[in-house]
Amino acid sequence: MGRESSCRYTRPNHRTDTQKPSSIYTPLEAKILQFFENSFLKELLTDNHITDIAFNGEFLSYQHNQKGRMKSEIEITKDEVFDFLRQLANLSEKQFSFQHIY
């Protein structure tokens, strides 16, 4: 039986824009931040009560500090998530591979 692919994003230290002005970001951090702000995750990332975002291979879910674990209404495919992660890895100049894609 194969393992289901999954990915997870956890908000580091619940940082907000008021805590770190854009002028303080390194050029690489600014590129990555802009990438996230223009992505399908924008809606979730703007809510400071959301601390964890996960994709289980079928749908996005997130952890909300007041509402608990929630299923996102954002519809996304495995291929779109794979492309998103590949682009993120390219932007951050990190190697990227999946042990189990599907």
Image: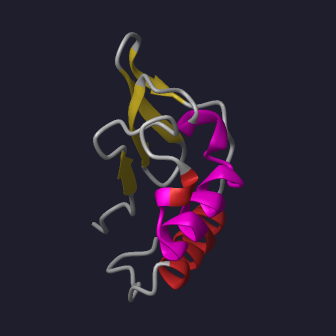
Residue 39 is inside the magenta segment: yes
The residue furthest front is 23
Q: How many marks?
A: 0
Up-down: is 26 above or below 76?
below
Q: Is residue 35 above or below residue 46?
A: below
Is 7 situated left or right of 85 in this image?
Answer: left
Closer to the camera in the image, 67 or 38: 38
Which residue occupies the foreground of this view, 74 or 45? Answer: 45
Q: How is the image coloured?
A: secondary structure
Residue at x 46%, y 36% (from the top left corner): 16
Main SS, magenta residues: helix
Q: Which region of the structure is painted magenta?
A: 24-45
- Residue 62: percent from the left, percent from the top? 43, 33
* Residue 5 percent location from the top left of the image: 39, 63
Quadrant containing the N terminus in the rendered view = bottom left
Looking at the image, the residue that sits furthest to the top is: 66
The x and y percentages for residue 71 are 51, 28
Work out whether residue 49 or residue 86 is closer to the camera in this orientation and state it: 49
- Image quadrant of residue 101? bottom left
Q: Is 24 on the left-hand or right-hand side of 81?
A: left
Magenta segment includes 48: no
